[in-house]
Amino acid sequence: MQLEEYWGVGPKTRETLAEQLGTERAIRAIESGDVRALTDAGLPRGRATRILRRATGGAGMDTLATSDARSAYKEVLDLAVDHAVTDRAADRIRVLTPLTSGDEMEARLDDVLAARDAWATFDENDRETVLAAYQRYDDRDGSEHAAVEAALALLEADVETGPFGAIADLEKTTLEEAAMALAGLDAGRVREGADEELDRLREALGAVEDMNANALEVIEDLRSEGVGDVAGFRDAFEDRLLSETQVTIDQVREAMPTDAADATDFVGGTLRGLRSDLTSAVDEREETVRTDLEATLSTDREAIDQAISAVDDIAFHLSLARFALAYDCTRPQFRTGGDAAVSVVGARNLTVAAREDATVQPITYTLGEHGVSAETLERDVGLDRGSKAGTETGADDGPTGEERVSVLTGANSGGKTTLLETLCQVTLLATMGLPVPAERAEVTPVDALVFHRRHASFNAGVLESTLRSIVPPLTGGGRTLMLVDEFEAITEPGSAANLLHGLVRLTVDRDALGVFVTHLADDLEPLPPEARVDGIFAEGLNPDLELLVDYQPRYGTVGRSTPEFIVSRLVANATDRSERVGFETLGEAVGNDVVQRTLADARWSES
């Protein structure tokens, strides 16, 4: 395969990769999803990530049918990356894509949840030890030595379950030997501290070289001490060498010339001889030590390679496990046969949960033939499913909770968009083989995820581009999940209602799943029996005049806008009399008695 056959690799990128890595190594890096190799070669991280996503999971990326779906996908990955224990693990998370194989989804879930369960058993000391080892691993740019040290730290934690089992199979003594050998070598040279005798010889050589550079000062010092004859000078110089250079008496006497013409010749000749002898001794000792260390590494190479691979794999799964623990994520159940469904019980929006001091209301919501119990639906969404299901007229009596399509209504700032995002996040995580932020979730892997956020641009160009974005996935075959937010924001209300009604019918006709957020529910009647209307309700103002909302949708009920609550807040917060009079006039338009009752309720709550 040629480099330019990969998505995103044009002539310039191919030239860069071929020059920096060579074609074969570049291909291996792309196929293995190695972000580091591509960025080290000079590619921007974002570009490298996009290339690798397409190379390793192109079919999965194709399920993200809209730009908003792709944005939501990136947002989820960013939240997971925040819990990465190494830069390499973060890179691997960034190139995760939706999977197209149910077996692959289950296998990844097995690994991540096993890592989560194992990490949950670590005490605080073990966690700090492991994270500190991974920090050193990062600080040393993923060196072999740092990897082996990280493996030893994981062994100390004494966990053998899940992905940690790859470390448990390694011999601790072998890794300790390898760590010492790796610590002792640096690009073919023996590091300081690897061998005491080599360190002594190097220190002695350095001292001799320093003394040789200042030979004239040494001679003057000896003469200033009152040494007058040749024998006395020789003895004083010998004592100086022994005290300052750590050489032996035999080395000194062997190096002293016997035919020196004067003191300068004698001192210079001795120091040159010592330097030559010590240089040879250092080289010989270093060669011996290096040979021994390399022999150790050769013997332990298999264990080292296993440790490096295991440490990287554990870092990847541990990072995802920490993410799952941070958001209390659970294993989703996949529906691969029969009708499609997406259902969540106690689901939480990750983006909201990630905010500091955030309070998240868990949500229950269902589409399609799910397995959520009648008791749960009655408790959470107010639906007495048992009284409706199983009767000939049940479908006409009201919602069953198994409609494939819903029209979601409710007050502004009522959490409708957040619910769409939550369903999108759950679907994305599940199809990536990751735990989801819910007490329980059922997901049918889809061939197209259509997520459309509200875009308040009121012109024909936006309408056309939106329809081009969200309609083709519905008509292209395969399973589709439609999550469309306030479609009416891009065209006039009358046309918007007609088009939205058509989208709902098209979604039903194509056996797709869908949630459509709108304020035009009354204009969409009659809906197909496979669709229902749900509502989210504001309940008033709290003592701080903030809107109180029950974010849990109620099935079969239109959620109304709450202008009286907003006007009530404006009346209460008016800064001068004329402003207050203006807002009170609006209050009369929406119902002055309602405004006054709202303010009274807020004051009563405060008291």
Image: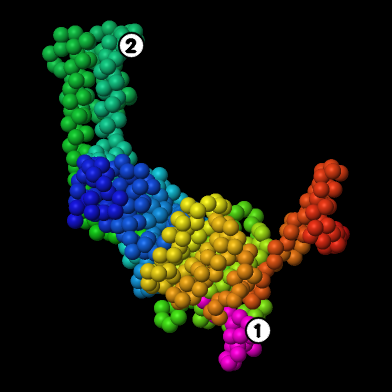
Is residue 564 toward the left or the right of residue 270 in the image? right
Rendering coords of residue 485 (x, y %): 55, 61
Residue that appears at 37% across and 69% down: 476
Task: Compare residues 494 and 247 and report the one nearer the observer.
Answer: 494
Q: What element carries label 2?
A: helix
Q: The N terminus appears in which quarter of the rendering?
A: bottom left
Is residue 512 toward the left or the right of residue 286 in the image? right
Answer above or below: position of 538 versus 545.
Answer: below
Disc 1 packing (10 Å; few <14; some 14–19; many ≥20): some
Mark 2 is on which residue type? Answer: Asp
Q: Mark 2 points at which residue?
A: 221
Of the residues under marks 1 and 2, which one precedes in the sequence? 2
Magenta extent: 384-404
Is residue 364 toward the left or the right of residue 9 in the image? right
Q: Which disc number belongs to residue 276?
A: none
- Distance between the alpha carbons at the discs numbered 1 and 2: 104 Å
Task: Compare residues 302 and 248 and report the one nearer the observer.
Answer: 302
Rendering coords of residue 22 (x, y %): 20, 46
Residue that appears at 56% across and 57% down: 491
Residue that appears at 79% across and 54% down: 586
In the displayed orientation, state which residue is furthest to the front.
494
Answer above or below: position of 117 versus 303.
Answer: below
Q: Mark 1 points at which residue?
A: 384
**Colour mode of the rendering:** rainbow
Main SS of the magenta part reads loop
Q: Is mark 1 on a helix, strand or loop?
A: loop
Task: Compare residues 433 and 232 and report the one nearer the observer.
Answer: 433
Is residue 444 toward the left or the right of residue 225 in the image? right
Q: Quadrant of residue 535?
A: bottom right
Res. 174 in view: no
Mark 1 is on which residue type? Answer: Asp
Rendering coords of residue 181 (x, y %): 28, 48
